[in-house]
Image (cartoon, rainbow, N blue to C red):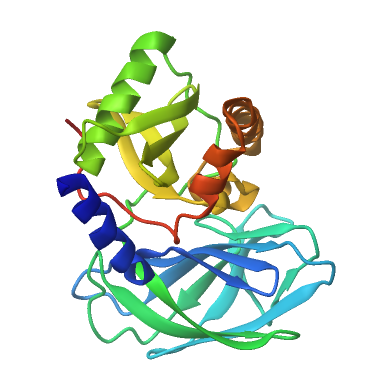
Amino acid sequence: MRFLALILALCAAMPATAHEFFLSGLQIIHPSLPATPVNANSAAVYMALSNEGDQDERLLGIETPFGMVRFVQPVTDAEGNIRMQERAWIDIPAGEIVLLARGELRGSLANVNRPLMEGGELTGTMIFEKRGRFDMFFMIDPVETETEHDPVSEIQRAAPPIDRAAAVSDIAASLRHALGSPDAVIAPVVLSENIAIAGWSLGNIGARAFLRRGADGWNVELWSNASLLQPATLTSLGVSRRQGDPLRAEMRAQEAALGPAYSRRFDAFPGTAYPTHSQP
């Protein structure tokens, strides 16, 4: 009964941990700001926007308690100098994914008059041309490092060869530890280099989990429903399309082989959650 109590408590807390929002076919994935030091007075704004509808959309602005978010993008002049150019809005074409990320198009928030603490939230209202106003919140992520990088298109470091059978066993162990249940069914499991997607089931409850391999082994970063198989979700997690597209296709194929009950169970999970511990 302990693991059932754990899952019920997790589901009850889901609205506070969800990292994506859905608005009439528009997926807003992990809107976030990095935590700021005490003396900082500005912060960057990141997210992924996936327009799954059949009409173009435009993000006109974002209101926050600190004021409006500015949209800026690095541009290079004829001399090769890089400067930040302000944009009045962000176009979100139908069927496309727009990424606000470090080193690329992003948001900028000034007049931040208090530290933003990691793990906290910041309320906001997004203003769209067609969909109107939408209340949401940003999650406060860890403080950024000094080195500027593109989290999506940077060249992937070569990963050392892995023993697939051992990796699947380690992934299952990490997931069972994060769930607090040795009885959890872990299937299917698909992996590519240093990332993996795995399904877990506890009775009639289940979800898809995203794991990343670090120096200390496989770590469970989150679990979610059908949104984890959206290209924009993996993009927001720093996974390139080259790596993510085959992974999503393999996960769908393995779920189909197991039977429709698995996909229905995973799709029914209410939102996205972050485990408090992921290593055995």
Q: Does residue 260 show up?
A: yes
Q: Observer-nearest residue: 163 or 269?
A: 269
Instruction: Tell me how many marks there are.
Output: 0
Residue at figure coordinates x 60%, y 32% from the top left? 259
Residue 35 shown left or right of residue 154 in the figure: left
Q: Height in image: 82 above or below 42? A: above
From the top left corner, tell me how far across and down residue 76 is, in percent.
67, 57
Q: Closer to the camera, 52 or 121?
A: 52
Q: Examine the rendering and report whether any part of residue 278 can be seen.
A: no
Residue 110 screen position, x and y as percent: 41, 83
> Outermost residue toward the right?
54
Q: Left of 210 or right of it: where is 106?
A: right
Q: Where is residue 36 in the image (x, y as percent from the top left)?
A: 27, 69
Which of the pair 129/163 is nearer the observer?
163
In the picture, residue 280 is in which quadrant? Answer: top left
* Residue 170 drawn above or below residue 176: above
Q: For the point 22% across and 77% down, which residue is it?
A: 115
Task: Please report the residue visible at 39 percent of the width from the left and 39 percent of the height from the top.
Answer: 201
Question: In percent of the image, x 36 and y 87: which residue is there?
Answer: 111
Q: Position of residue 22 (x, y in %)?
A: 59, 70
